[in-house]
Amino acid sequence: MSTLIEAHIRPQAGKGASRKLRAQNLIPAVIYGKHLKEALHISVDPVVVRKAIQTPRKLNTVLTLSLSNGETHLVLLKDTQRHPLSDKLLHVDFLSVRENEPVKVNIPIILAGKPQGVIDGGVLSQQRRNLEVLALPASIPEQIEVDVSHLKIAQVLHVNDIAMPAGVVHKSNVNFTIATISTPDTESPAAVAAAPAAEAKTDTKAAAKDAKKK
């Protein structure tokens, strides 16, 4: 079930028209998508839009725009323009979607459980926190929870290791890393590179002291 938002067709575009809208506590918006012959220019109440996406799905919340001309459009909020100081919405873009067609969305990845490797002294690092998937609008999950309690030191969790929720498909030719378990004493590349320089500096100081003694 989607949240209903009232919207009005915008007869004019441009900065002047946008200022008039904001004086009426409205903001300009656009509906676009492959189902539309051309983008629809509308106006909406920014307070209503903010409230509508205050759900666990956030930007992946499915909305229904009820237009002043009688049309209704099932949409997702895809982009926003905000005031740099007040963070108020100034403009929003909506993507038109269909109930029976998958849509591409980014879903948060949540790691659950305490890895065996962490219990043994290792360190858990999460490489990716979001995953791009395809899902029907009604099947978009709030998050993808992954159990990592089985991971041991030096083990890696890849995207292909994740069981997708029902109705959700991940398509990628790259089996990228989601999380790793490393040992706490593993030296970083920066530390390894700095070691010879530090040793050379110490040797120089020692040589200087010997020269003074002589």
Image (tube, grey):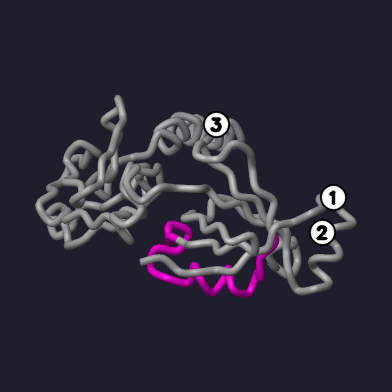
Q: Secondary structure at mark 1?
A: loop
Indicate the quadrant where residue 104 lies. Answer: top left
Task: Residue 45: say if magenta.
Answer: yes
* Depicted 192 relative to depicted 107: above or below: above
In this rendering, position of residue 162 left or right of residue 27: left
Residue 93 pos. (x, y %): 61, 51
Where, quadrant-wise, is the N terminus in this rendering?
A: bottom left
- Magenta span covers which residues? 43-62
Contact check, label 2 and label 1, Cβ < 8 Å: yes
The residue sitting at the top extreme is: 173
- Crowd tier of the residue under label 2, counting other residues whose Cα lies within 10 Å: few below 14, some 14–19, many 20 or above: many
The residue sitting at the right extreme is: 16
Q: Which residue is mark 3?
A: 204
Q: CA distance from mark 2 to mark 1?
A: 6 Å
Q: Residue at x 47, y 34 (%)?
A: 194
Residue 59 pos. (x, y %): 48, 59
The residue sitting at the front extreme is: 70
Task: Residue 28: say if magenta.
Answer: no
Checking the image for residue 18, the label placed there is: 2
- Crowd tier of the residue under label 1, counting other residues whose Cα lies within 10 Å: few below 14, some 14–19, many 20 or above: few
| Amino acid at the residue labelled 2 | Ser
Q: Residue at x 73, y 63 (%)?
A: 27
Where, quadrant-wise, is the C terminus in this rendering?
A: top right
Q: Which residue is mark 1?
A: 14
| Amino acid at the residue labelled 1 | Gly
In this rendering, position of residue 2 left or right of residue 90: left
Checking the image for residue 141, the label placed there is: none
